[in-house]
Image (cartoon, helix red, strand yellow):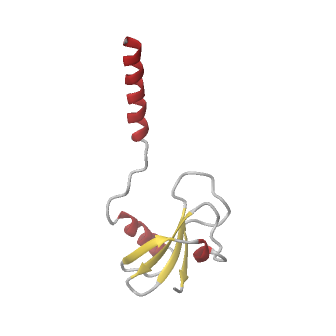
Amino acid sequence: MRIAAVIVGVAALALVSSAGQADIAPPPGEMERMLQTMIQNAGYSCAKVLSFEKATDRDTAGAGVPIGVDTSVVDCAEGKSYLVAWQAHPQPPPTDVRLPFVKPIRK
């Protein structure tokens, strides 16, 4: 009986500790600010991010975006759209392409 209680206790601790390592969603507006900053730091204008969505293979095809990075298509208030790529998780750089990568696109 005691062994079963110890096993249950250890299992509960394992579940709690692994749940604490899960990705936590950023606070509202943080992604928009991050994308806006990347666009502006690349020398483009973006007064406000209106929307963004994960880029598709069609969006990134032929754009020179390295494989294995996070990408989004960002719509700014000025009516301009940008393809933005960045390394969200620490890992070796996939190529010698400088990140974050920002490229104006037409939708």
Q: Quadrant of residue 18?
A: top left
Q: How many labels does the image show?
A: 0
- Which of the two residues, 50 or 53, is positioned nearer the viewer here? 53
Q: Residue furthest left?
A: 28
Residue at image location 46% in from the left, 85% down from the top? 80
Q: Position of residue 52 (x, y in %)?
A: 43, 73
- Which of the two residues, 37 or 86, is positioned nearer the viewer here? 86
Q: Quadrant of residue 37?
A: bottom left
- Which of the two residues, 58 or 79, is positioned nearer the viewer here? 58
Above or below 91: residue 52: below
Above or below 53: residue 80: below
Residue 43, can we see it? no
Q: Where is residue 85 in the image (x, y as percent from the top left)?
A: 55, 68
Q: Which residue lies furthest to the top in this view?
A: 2
34 with respect to 91 (left or right) = left
60 with respect to 15 (left or right) = right
54 with respect to 27 (left or right) = right
Residue at image location 39% in from the left, 51% down from the top? 24
Above or below 105: residue 9: above
Q: Position of residue 90 (x, y in %)?
A: 55, 51
Residue at image location 67% in from the left, 77% down from the top? 62
12 with respect to 59 (left or right) = left
Residue 31, can we see it? yes
Q: Quadrant of residue 56?
A: bottom right
Residue at image location 41% in from the left, 24% down from the top? 10
* Image quarter hosting the N terminus: top left
Q: Position of residue 63 (x, y in %)?
A: 63, 76
